[in-house]
Amino acid sequence: MLPVCIREQLKDLGLDVQHDCVAIQAGLSGASVYRVGDYAIKHHPLSSLQRLAQIHQYQKRWADSVPSLVPGLVSWPGSLRHAISTILIVADNEHPSTQGCWECIKWMPGESIGRIEQVGIEQVRAVANALGLLHRHSKHWHSKFDASDLGDDRMLQRERLFQQLLLTRLSSQQRVLDRLATRPKRSALNNNFIDEFSHEFIDCLRFALGVAMRIAIDSQRAMQKLCQATKLRYPIHGDAWRGNWLFEGSRVSGLIDFSQADIRWPGFDFSRAIGTMVLSDRLLWNEAWSSYCEALGDPGYQLDEAMLMHRVSTVLTLVSYIDRMGQNETIESQARVRIEEICKCLQLYFDTAQ
C-alpha cells in the first residue's frame, strides 16, 4: 500500500487514490512500481541524491526527445523547493518499507517479454531501431563532452573480473556445483534442505561452466584490446535487457528503469538488449545491427565488438548466478529463466564451435 504522505501528494496532482494500489512490477534491483491513473509511482532505496539527479537529467532529456519511448518525470507538489523536484523523500521510522525516494513517472503501456523463445524477429528489429534512436539523441546533445581521458568503470570492472576468472579457472564455481550436487534432498520429515536445483540442472550448469571457460580463454586478448582501445562514451540506458522493453504486439511501446543510466561505451546497451532477445544466431544479430545503424548512423564501434561484450557478459553473469547459489541465496523465477537461457546460449556456442 502507498504511504499516506504519497497519497496526499498524488491528490495534489489530481490523481485518484481512492482504491488501494497494487504493485505491478518488482525488479531485481529491489524497486517497486505502482500504477495510479496514467502514472507509475516508483519507490526505491537510492540514497545518493547526486547520482539520482544525474539519472533524472538523462531521463528528462530522452523523454523530451523521444516521449513515445521514454517515460517523463513528474514533479511532486511538495518537492518543488528541493533541488530534485522529481522525487519525494520519505523518512518514516514507523514504516521502514516506505522510506527512501519516491518518483512519479508517466505510465508506459505494453508488456515485457518473459522468455527468449517468445521473441520475434520484428521485435528484435524494433528494439534495435529504438535503441539506435535513443543513442542518436545522446550523441547529439552530448556531442561536446570529451570522454577521451576518462576510464569506463564498467568496462574496466568487467575486464578485471574476466582476468580473475582466467587465473582461477572457475575453480570456485566448480566447487559450488560439486557441493550442490551432493546436497541432500528435502523430504517430508526434513525441511532443512532446499531442493531447488535438480541433478539435471546442475549438470547443465557444469557443462555451461566448461564452455564459459573456453570462451574466456578465446576472448581474453580481444577483451583486453577493446578495453584499452575504445574511447567512445556518451549517456546510455545501462540496463537495456529484454525485461525493460515494453511491447504492444511487435511495436516497442516504452523503455523503463533508468537506474543504471550513465556515460559509458554504447556497445553495452546493444549487447545487453540483443543478447537477451536472441541466442547465438548471427543472422539475427546482423538484422538487429542493420536496424540499429539505420536509426543511429555510424555507431563508432563494430558489431563484433558488441558480440564480444555479449560473450564476456554471458560468462560473468553465469559466474554471478553460481556464486549466489553457493551463498544459499534465493534464485527468483525471473533469474532462473535467465540462467536456463544462458545455458542454452552456451550450448549453442559449443555446437557452433565444433
Image (tube, rainbow, N blue to C red):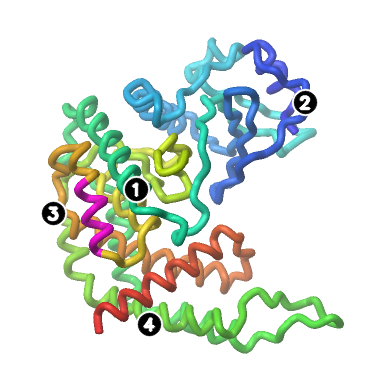
Q: Please give the label number shown on residue 229.
A: 3
Q: Which structural element holds mark 1?
A: helix
Q: Where is residue 292 in the image (x, y as percent from the top left)?
A: 23, 44
Q: Where is residue 44 in the image (x, y as percent from the top left)?
A: 58, 37
Q: Which residue position holds label 1?
A: 122
Badge 2: how crowded within 10 Å, few (<14), some, or many (20+)? few
In the image, 326: left or right of 314?
right
Lower sequence index among marks 2 and 1: 2
Residue type at tag 3: Ala
Cα distance between the residues tagged 2 and 1:
38 Å
Q: Give the mark toward the camera: 2 or 1.
A: 1
Q: Residue at label 2?
A: 19
Does 247 sit left or right of 350 as displayed? Answer: right
Cα distance, mark 3 to mark 4?
29 Å
Amino acid type of the residue tagged 2 in the rendering: His
Q: Position of residue 343 (x, y in %)?
A: 44, 73
Report the magenta residues as a range: 282-290
**Residue 286 magenta:** yes
Q: Earlier in the sequence, mark 3 or mark 4?
A: 4
- Report the mark closest to the observer, 4 or 2: 2
Q: Image height check: is 251 above or below 63?
A: below
- Give the SS element for disc 2: loop
Give the quarter of the image for residue 92.
Answer: top right
- Which tag, 4 or 2, sits closer to the chain's start? 2
Q: Is mark 4 on a helix, strand or loop?
A: helix
C-alpha separation, residue under disc 4 versus residue under disc 1: 33 Å
Asked if the residue at tag 1 contacts the one at tag 4, i.e. Cβ–Cβ closer than 8 Å, the answer is no
Of the numbered discs in the image, which one, if any, rests on residue 210? 4
Which residue is located at x 76 percent, y 23 percent? 4
